[in-house]
Image: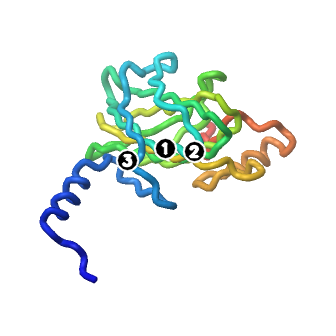
Amino acid sequence: MQADTSPLRLVLIGFAAAIAPACDHVHVGPTLPSPDSYVELEPNDTPSLADFVAITDSATFLTVEGHVQAIGFDVVDHLEFEACEPMELRFFLEAHAPFGDVDVSVYDPIDQVILGTYASGGPTEIGTLLIHEPGRPFQFVIDAFVEDTPWCLMLEGFPAPLGLQPPSGPGDLEGVRRQRGADSALPPIETDAPPVAEN
């Protein structure tokens, strides 16, 4: 059977590709519908002015697009979410400027602490959160390092792993648990962020 290459079909495919979301990250897994798309709202430069985007769950699949400056009035963007259930949340952040370098921290506005920072020195940051406490708000804090850049943040939710095992991803949450002690209570949110170098 030969593929349909009629001009109308090619025009429709071209149009669909032109309006596709800016995130270039490819979803791995079963076919999902297009992600829900949001655009950041200013002002969102402090934890108290965070842009509340959405309530997340294990079926979350969304993107948020925005812009941040390396120097100027908009040097950081706070995006707030709330998990309605224990879950694993994977994120992918991408800068869209030619030499863009975005970094992201995960911030707990209740305890007022940074839970982890992802600063690879490149245009993308990838990580995983394991959320144990339903109803817990958390914020992604995005900043630019080299130049002003538009950015795209993609979030993908998954059910909490059985037995609250650490999520698959680049970090080692199990190692963090071993250091903390097996009998200690789980924190509300865990990240797989690389450890911060101590001086």
Label 2 sits on a secondary structure element that is strand
What mark, if any, has residue 155 been given in the picture? 1
Q: Quadrant of residue 3?
A: bottom left
Label 3 sits on a secondary structure element that is loop
Query: Dividing the image into 4 quarters, which one contains the N terminus?
Result: bottom left
Label 1 sits on a secondary structure element that is strand
x, y (%) of residue 102? 40, 40
The residue at 51%/28% (across/down) is 80
Kind of residue sitting beneath label 2: Leu
The residue closer to the viewer here, 39 or 170, is 39
Q: Earlier in the sequence, mark 1 or mark 2?
A: 2
**What residue did someone put label 3 on?**
123
The residue at 18%/64% (across/down) is 10
Whether pointer 2 and pointer 3 mark residues with C-beta atoms closer than 8 Å, the reply is no
Outermost residue toward the right?
A: 183
The residue at 64%/48% (across/down) is 159
Label 1 crowd bin: few (<14), some (14–19), many (20+), radius 10 Å: some
**What residue did someone put label 2 on?**
89
Kind of residue sitting beneath label 3: Pro
Q: Earlier in the sequence, mark 1 or mark 3?
A: 3
Measured along the vertical axis of the image, is residue 52 above or below residue 163? above
x, y (%) of residue 126? 49, 49
Q: Is residue 87 left or right of residue 70?
A: right
Q: CA distance from mark 2 to mark 3?
A: 20 Å
